[in-house]
Every structure is written in structure tokens, then in C-alpha cells.
């Protein structure tokens, strides 16, 4: 039976994308089941445009299939194209085929999470002369119009200013016009390492055993994408709204209180520590950020979590998440091509295998291969920092982060990678490059105790690659940053190094770059 005979006389074809799995999405409002059709499509190209982690593919497909089933259980008309139900590798090509077959009067979609896909969908509808409507994604607390109004007339855009504005506007953690706790942030309290004793007994995050739908998707992905990176043995991510709410409950009850002080800490063999593990559920829209923020704030008011932990968590959801979304759409499409530091080296091959002698890199990448996850400091100050110091081309780093993390959607991944991690945008997102030597990793983790490299040594057989490349980075970019008010101290320290010693360090850095 053809698509047109299955669904005759479609008034509006309502597209639901893999990161839009919320029942309250604008595209699902005012739906007339007698005339409208909900359209979801699994497309191989969405998994292969970057070599996506197997767990990332499973998460998206399983969550989409569960969401489609929930819509059908309401009696809503759903056209769901599985990978083996159509011959098109690209989502937009599958849509074009259905526009020809179904002849809808118009198409609507909530704004996608990727500029490329938005343009591709628009182009298909234009070719077929079908009106195309893009709806505001009010999953976010701050619409793009709100962000543009806030940004208008500002010489520089900074997260801190945006965060304070949004907290005031939405009355989050506020006491009148003042922030609760007497400060806007508690970063000084929230950067503690665990010390030699480690994190102690941890409450593992709630795990979700694959059901029949997820198990079938795991088998499909293993068969269809055998060369994709990553493993599936440990797959236990929430794939439904109910599971995501249970994961939120678990975090609020078991880990939020200790999250703040140790949010930057790292520990071998502990991928989650006190972190929420909610980013994937949020980015697929299985959770509403308002609900997440409200639950954290309620925990503070009930005395279940200190202000340092609650503010640190709220900052990630209300602050960074909203800010990078606004910045992404403001700066696209040029943003993906930014390369302010003229970095052109290829990404080392061990980023895909974990086969490296550096313990911090090896353990972090092996964790990513196992779970499709690393917390923000592992991303920024381990894998991201090494790529920055080595001088890897930002677009290559961007592709790796988009491929390897289950929570990766371009609107959130690209600014965090290109702006925060790689300084490729020249300071648009972050005012300075986040660079450090191996001493930072030694202070914040126990990785160095298991490593043959010495973070105190910048040259020689046991030199830490991070330390070597750190000093080389400072030397290479001295002209740009030596007078920067937030980085000048680092470059003054560079001046104290004996010239012959610095030459040896830079020679060793060249060797590291040749080795990849």
C-alpha cells in the first residue's frame, strides 16, 4: 500500500525530529487527527554524516520509536519510517518522496537543532512548492527573539551577563532583586578535587535496562552500523519521558547535594560521580528544562541541597544551555568555519580508539567509547584541552564531539566545542582560551598516579604531553595573548623560562605533533 492511500487528504504534515520528543512541542498543538499527519523518519545519513557512536544512534532511534508508540496510543495518526522502510539515506530525501506521494497542503516543524537540516527541509518544500512553516521552539526558556533583544547593542556577549538577566527575568533563585545566597555564582566553592581519599561511596545513577524496543534497536544498529565507534554493552540511557523523570528524581534525591563542590573533579573508573546524567534527556526534549530547574530549586528550599550545588546546576541548565543555543542561531552558518588560532593539524587517531599512553586521555576516551559520555571537565580540560594545545583543526574536533556523545545535537555541541573548548571563534563565547598544563589534571584527578608521564616535566622522556604543549602554546600565541587581562600572568611565567629550556620544550612539542 502506498503512502498516499494510507493517509489520503493530508492538510498538514507535522514533522517531528529525533531531538524533539516532547508531547508539548508546538508542532503537536492544535493538531486535527482527521486532517493532519505526524511524520517521523529514521535516516542513515543522520548517523553517518559524522561517524556516530553506536550508543548515540541507539538512543535517538529507540527514543523516537517509543515516542511514536506513545502518540499512537493516543489515537493520533503517525507515519513512522524505519531505516528499512524506505530507500533514502537522507531525511530530507525521504520527506521529498512523501511530499510527492502524500501531497500535503503544507508542512510544519518546530525549529530543528541543526542549521543544515533546517535549510535542507526548507529547500525540499520549496522544490515541491509546499508551504513550509518553522515554529518557535518554546522548549527553551529564552526564544531567539528574546536572545537577540538581550544581545542588541552589546559590544561583547558574555554568559555571566546573560545568566543574571535571565535569572532576574524568570525569578530563579532570587530574593527580590538580589540573588539567593548573596552571590550570583559560587565557583570558588565548586572547584574542589576529591583529594587522595577519592570520592568515597557513590550512589550510582539510575540505570534503565533495554526493553523490547530498545533491544531491537541495539540489534539493528550493531548489524547496520558495524564500523561505527563505541560499544553497546553498557547502554542504559533513559529513552522515554517517564524514564527521564525517574532519572531526574534520582539525581535530585541522591547526587544534587554533593554536585556543586565536586562538579569539576575527576576520578578513575567513575564516569558519573555526582553528575546529573540528564543532558541527553534534555536535548532530546524528554525533559522540560523548567521542570528540571524547579526541582533543583525546590530541593534547596526544602533544605535537601545547599545553594552552592543548586546554583551550580541551575547555571548549567538556565545559563549555559540557553546561552549557547542563542549564540548558535545568531552566528550560523559561518560559526562552523571559525578558526581564529589557525589550527590545521588532523585529529589524532587515538581519539577513536583510546590507544594512548597518557592516562587521562586513555581513561576519558575509553569511557566515551563505553558510555558515549564524559562530564564537562573531561570534555573541556582533557580531550578538548589536548586538541587545543596540539593545534587540531577546530572542525575536526567539532565532528568528533558531535559523533561521540549521546547528548550531542549541533546547537549545543558546536558552541561548546568551537567557542569554549577550542577558542576557534576568537573570544565570542569565552573571553580567553581555557589552557592549562598537566598540573591542572593532577590537581583535579588521580589520573596522573597511573601515568608514566610526569606533569611537572615539560621535556624529556617522562614529559607530560599536556605540560609540553601548554608552554609551546603560550610561545606560539604570545603576540595575541600576552597583554590579555585574563591571561597575562601565564605569559609572564613564560618569560621566566630559560631560552635554551624553552627551545627544548618546543622541540619536544614538535615531536608530539609529528606523532599525532
Image (tube, helix red, strand yellow):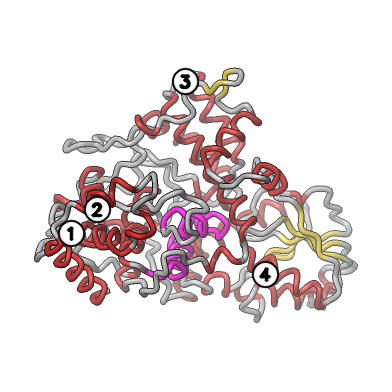
Give the SS element for disc 4: strand
Mark 3 or mark 2, earlier in chain: 3
In front here: 55 or 7?
A: 55
**CB-based contact (under 8 Å), mark 2 and mark 1:** yes
Q: Residue at x 63, y 76 (%)?
A: 90
Q: Which residue is mark 2?
A: 437
Q: What is the magenta range?
A: 392-421
Mark 3 or mark 1, earlier in chain: 3
Q: How many angstroms separate mark 2 from mark 4 (CA)?
A: 49 Å
Mark 3 or mark 4, earlier in chain: 4
Q: Which residue is mark 1?
A: 464
**CB-based contact (under 8 Å), mark 3 and mark 2:** no
Q: Residue at x 66, y 42 (%)?
A: 150
Give the SS element for disc 1: loop
Q: How many angstroms separate mark 3 from mark 2 (CA)?
A: 33 Å
Q: Is residue 23 something that shows in the picture?
A: no
Q: Which residue is mark 4?
A: 81
Mark 1 or mark 4, earlier in chain: 4
Residue 199 lies, in percent from the top left, at 25, 37
Prevailing SS of the magenta stretch: helix
Amino acid at each position: 500500500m502506498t503512502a498516499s492511500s494510507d493517509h489520503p487528504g493530508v492538510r498538514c504534515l507535522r514533522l517531528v525530529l529525533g531531538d524533539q520528543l516532547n508531547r508539548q512541542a508546538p508542532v503537536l498543538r492544535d493538531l486535527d487527527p482527521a486532517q493532519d499527519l505526524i511524520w517521523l523518519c529514521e535516516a542513515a545519513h543522520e548517523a553517518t554524516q559524522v561517524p556516530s557512536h553506536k550508543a548515540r544512534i541507539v538512543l535517538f532511534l529507540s527514543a523516537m520509536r517509543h515516542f511514536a508508540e506513545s502518540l499512537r496510543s493516543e489515537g493520533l495518526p503517525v507515519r513512522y519510517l524505519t531505516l528499512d522502510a524506505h530507500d533514502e539515506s537522507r531525511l530530507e530525501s525521504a520527506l521529498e518522496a512523501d511530499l510527492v506521494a502524500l501531497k500535503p497542503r503544507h508542512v510544519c516543524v518546530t525549529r530543528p537543532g541543526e542549521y543544515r537540516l533546517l535549510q535542507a527541509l526548507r529547500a525540499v518544500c520549496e522544490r515541491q512548492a509546499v508551504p513550509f512553516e518553522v515554529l518557535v521552539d518554546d522548549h527553551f526558556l529564552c526564544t531567539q527573539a528574546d536572545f537577540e533583544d538581550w544581545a542588541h547593542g552589546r559590544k561583547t556577549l558574555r554568559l555571566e551577563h546573560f545568566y543574571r538577566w535571565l535569572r532576574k527575568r524568570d525569578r530563579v533563585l532570587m530574593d527580590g532583586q538580589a540573588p539567593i545566597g548573596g552571590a550570583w555564582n559560587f565557583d570558588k566553592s565548586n572547584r574542589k578535587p576529591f583529594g587522595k581519599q577519592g570520592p568515597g561511596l557513590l550512589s550510582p545513577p539510575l540505570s534503565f535496562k533495554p526493553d523490547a524496543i530498545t533491544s531491537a534497536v541495539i540489534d539493528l544498529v550493531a548489524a547496520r552500523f558495524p564500523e561505527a565507534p563505541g560499544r553497546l554493552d553498557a547502554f542504559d540511557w533513559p529513552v522515554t519521558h517517564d524514564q527521564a523523570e525517574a532519572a531526574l528524581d534520582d539525581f535530585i534525591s541522591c547526587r544534587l547535594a554533593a554536585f556543586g563542590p565536586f562538579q569539576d573533579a575527576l576520578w578513575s573508573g567513575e564516569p558519573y560521580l555526582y553528575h546529573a546524567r540528564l543532558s541527553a534527556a534534555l536535548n532530546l526534549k524528554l525533559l522540560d528544562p523548567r521542570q528540571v530547574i524547579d526541582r533543583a530549586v525546590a530541593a534547596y528550599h526544602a533544605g535537601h541541597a545547599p545553594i552552592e550545588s543548586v546554583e551550580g546546576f541551575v547555571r548549567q541548565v538556565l545559563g549555559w544551555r540557553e546561552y549557547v543555543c542563542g549564540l548558535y542561531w545568531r552566528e550560523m552558518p559561518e560559526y562552523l568555519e571559525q578558526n581564529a588560532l589557525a589550527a590545521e593539524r588532523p585529529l589524532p587517531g587515538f581519539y577513536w580508539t583510546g590507544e594512548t599512553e597518557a592516562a587521562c586521555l586513555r581513561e576519558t576516551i575509553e569511557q566515551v567509547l563505553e558510555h558515549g559520555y564524559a562530564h564537562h571537565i573531561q570534555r573541556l580540560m582533557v580531550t578538548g584541552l589536548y586538541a587545543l594545545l596540539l593545534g587540531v583543526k577546530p572542525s575536526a574536533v567539532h565532528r568528533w564531539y558531535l559523533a561521540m556523545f549521546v547528548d550531542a545535537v549541533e546547537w549545543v555541541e558546536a558552541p561548546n566545542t568551537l567557542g569554549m573548548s577550542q577558542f576557534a571563534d576568537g573570544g565570542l563565547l569565552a573571553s580567553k582560551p581555557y589552557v592549562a598544563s598537566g598540573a591542572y589534571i593532577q590537581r583535579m584527578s588521580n589520573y596522573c598516579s597511573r601515568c608514566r608521564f610526569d606533569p611537572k616535566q615539560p621535556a624529556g622522556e617522562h614529559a607530560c604531553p599536556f605540560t609540553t604543549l601548554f608552554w609551546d602554546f603560550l610561545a606560539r600565541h604570545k603576540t595575541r595573548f600576552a597583554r590579555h587581562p585574563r591571561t597575562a600572568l601565564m605569559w609572564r611565567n613564560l618569560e621566566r623560562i630559560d631560552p635554551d629550556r624553552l627551545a627544548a620544550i618546543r622541540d619536544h612539542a614538535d615531536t608530539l605533533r609529528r606523532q599525532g
